[in-house]
Amino acid sequence: MTARGLWRSVRDDLGRHWRHVGAGALGIAVSIAALVFFLALGLGVRTVLLGEVFPVDRIEVFPRSTDLNLLALKLELGKDTIDDAMVGKLEAIDGVAAVYPKMRLLAPALATGGESLIGTGMQTELVADGIDPALVADDVGAAFHDPLVDRSVIGLACGENSTCPGGAICVGASVFGPGECREAIPVIVSEHMVELYNGAFRRAYRLPKVNPQALIGLGIDVSFGASSLRPSGRRVARDRVVLAGFSDAAIPLGITMPLGFVRRLNRELGPDGAGDGYHSAVVESASRNAVAGIVTASEHLGLEVRDGGARRASFFMTVALAAVSLIGIVILAVSALHVMHVFALLVMIRRREIGVMRAVGASRADVRLLLMTEAAVVGFAAGLCGLIGAAVLVRAADRALTSGLPDFPFKPESFFAFDPWLAAAALTLAVASCVLGALAPSLRATGPDPAEVLSST
């Protein structure tokens, strides 16, 4: 049988029996639509959870310490910092792409400002830490850097800010030199802070809602070494920080500054030895498959690994996607059984037609090829209809979720991940289900002798 003849026969047969094959295709289409919809939803949620909320390619390691409970207090025993030698050991672990040390600001700090934003000044204790700017280069870019290293406008004598060029500030009573022009310290914050402010905080104090992107470039004055609770007992360094952007790597509540600046503040204004060690390190893996080995190696080095729940979230999402896939496959299996019954009925209806084909020279293989090709065409059409239905459902549900749900941290622009491989897999499943469903009827159709079939009809 030629390819043209085969296609003409398939077209004519499906046209004559479209009501019967349509009933079988409907079940396949509905199954594919449901499977693709829920898989796209699961993959979309997984992308947000494991890509933004719990990045699985980054883990944070801390020095392992033992706490001694003394009634309401805890006495920390052991070393609470990581030195450069330990950072080198982490970098030597197989699968590690980079290691970024982090350091807490151990000197007290008071922040003042906010007049231009909310119309009234505020003063608050400031919590801060320091990270390597390279860690957030993809999020913030060159705006987050250490101005004490990149000395673009530094070293000029000044009396006030207006005498400094290029928007630099005049740092007078500072641990970094009196009366000196310098760029303000760029800082980053977590988007979670903005969400908290726009949520309960502003409502409690009747303050206006803020636009996160409009906050970039906003500056506040900070007095390092000053505190409303207890001063450091050393000098007070007055400086200005400017918001450079937002990143998930920033401290959840507070500001994150360049690591070198925090180290100098700790050495000048913090406790003895405060700037000599790191309090944690972010370990970036070369691939997600290497994370398990990195975790094990880090624990062998005596470090405590905290992934923010990434491993639990990854396990939960894997189980959820497996469950959805299993349910979808069961539905497809039921639909394949329905297709088998439909083609068994078609074989009975076309029993004489098949006998005539055999009598005029068609082989068993030709008849089987015809029936299997018809099943494949039905499966492809059903799968395509299922994909179109799933796309319509995804679009409608995505629009309802994004517009109906209030803003919350890490709210995605889309709750679904409709990838090309998912469409290809769905079409393959639809075709395979129909072909497998039609396999047994096609084998039975070519079993009897043509003479017996024609004589009995």
Image (cartoon, rainbow, N blue to C red):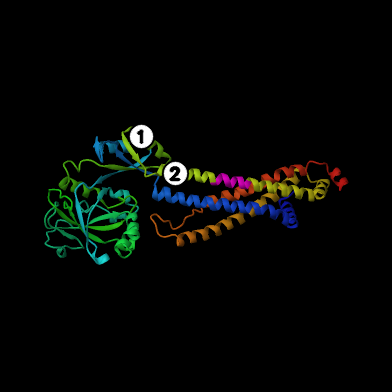
The x and y percentages for residue 70 are: 24, 37
Quadrant in which residue 222 is drawn:
bottom left
Q: Which residue is at the far right?
A: 455
* Camera-side residue of 46 and 168: 46
Counting other residues with Cα less than 10 Å from the Cα at mark 2, is it few (<14), some (14-19), or many (20 or more)? some
Pair 1/2: label in front:
2
Magenta-colored segment: predominant secondary structure = helix
The x and y percentages for residue 135 are: 32, 48
The x and y percentages for residue 128 are: 25, 50
User: Which stretch did the figure color magenta?
Assistant: 324-332
- Give SS at disc 1: helix
Residue that carries the numbered disc 2 in the rendered image = 314
Residue 133 in magenta stretch? no
Q: Amino acid at mark 1?
A: Ala
Report, in whole angstroms, how far the alpha carbon at label 1 lies from the one at label 2.
20 Å
Answer left or right for 118 relative to 28. left
Task: Tell me, yes or no, if residue 133 can be seen here.
Answer: yes
Task: Tell me, yes or no, if residue 370 can be seen here.
Answer: no
* Camera-side residue of 136 and 327: 327
The x and y percentages for residue 368 are: 73, 45
Q: Residue at x 60, y 55 (%)?
A: 386
Q: How many marks?
A: 2
Q: Residue at x 43, y 56 (%)?
A: 412
Residue 331 in magenta stretch? yes
Answer left or right for 384 relative to 120. right
Residue that carries the numbered disc 1 in the rendered image = 297
- Give SS at disc 2: helix
Q: Residue at x 31, y 33 (%)?
A: 301
Q: Amino acid at mark 2?
A: Ser
Q: Earlier along the polypeptide chain: callout 1 or callout 2?
A: 1
Q: Are marks 1 and 2 in contact (CB under 8 Å)?
A: no
